[in-house]
Amino acid sequence: NDFDEDVVSAYRAERSPAEQKSSSSEEVKSSSSEEVKSSSSEDMKSSSSEEAKSSSSSEAASSSSEGCPETFEDERDGTVYGVVDIFDRNSKTSRCWFAKNLEYAQKYSECYEGEAPNCKTYGRLYSGDQLDNKGKSAACPEGTHIVTLDDLQHFVSMTGLKKDCSVEKDGTCEGAAVYMKNKQGWGASGALYGQSVLGMLPGGSFVEDDYALIGENGYWWIADDSFDAGYGFIVLSTDSEVLTVTDVTGEDLKRTYYSIRCVLDF
């Protein structure tokens, strides 16, 4: 009430439009600068946090990815095999099995009944002539070996089976088959409730010039010094949960063709 209204009006009228614009611009600039600064600071903080989190996650993933590779390429023919990590909690060790039977074509190997689709589904059948007595196979690619009795014992240890289970020469293991068989291809005796680990299929055999039992039985060469000729074979049968390990004589090796499953050297 003490101000002269005429003086106040005159003061307001005397301020030029440019002065008013400058003042407004400074206010906007100041406000914008503060917002940008604040936003930039938050973005940088958020970005830094995300990078640190991502880096930490990556390191954790890297540190937990030790063990078996996911695949193995046979450089001889370019075939890529999935790899199954068989981790035994008792010994805290892994064995790296091929996820399917060997398919490499070489002398003294056969597709069941000479049919290529059988090779694709079941892998090839290999003569005992391709084996030696050191756990190696001329068929398995470099860096791998034919499954050994020790590999098989490690696998069974992983399952936790103990009762009625002897994985030795001429031994049997009740219940092991369900962990080895594929879910399909074995009738009602296929793996149950996700227990399939190796996905084995009944590829039959070629013995003394006769093909037999495809879709019913599967046979795989296995190596160990306890076998008379250094090699025996694994048997899985339809409608049975039993794994059988059987010996074979030296002369029979030449006339017998079975499947081969390779394991990475360790």
Image: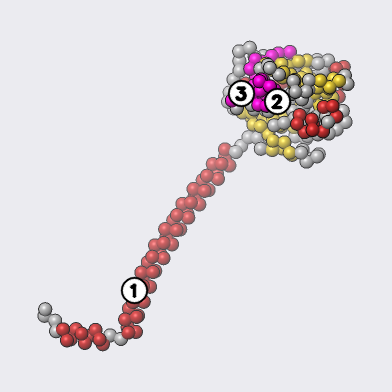
Q: Horizontal and vertical percent for residue 101?
A: 75, 30
In magenta, the rendered stretch is: 170-193
Query: Residue 8: x and y, percent?
Result: 19, 83
Q: What residue type is disc 2 on? A: Gly
- Mark 2 surroundings within 10 Å by alpha-carbon count, few (fewer than 14), some (14 through 19), many (20 or more): some
Q: Name the mark on residue 192.
A: 3
Name which residue lies at 41% across and 65% down. 36
What residue is disc 2 on? Answer: 185
Q: Find disc 1 in the rendering and name its residue.
A: 27
Question: In the figure, is residue 224 to the left or right of 18?
Answer: right
Tell me which amino acid carries mark 3: Leu
Do we see residue 192 in this rendering?
yes
Q: Is residue 104 above or below residue 58?
A: above
The image position of residue 189, as x and y in percent, is: 66, 20
Label 2 sits on a secondary structure element that is loop
Labels 2 & 1 near each other (Cβ < 8 A): no
- Is 188 included in the stretch rendered in magenta? yes
Identify which residue, 23 or 56, lies in the foreground. Answer: 23
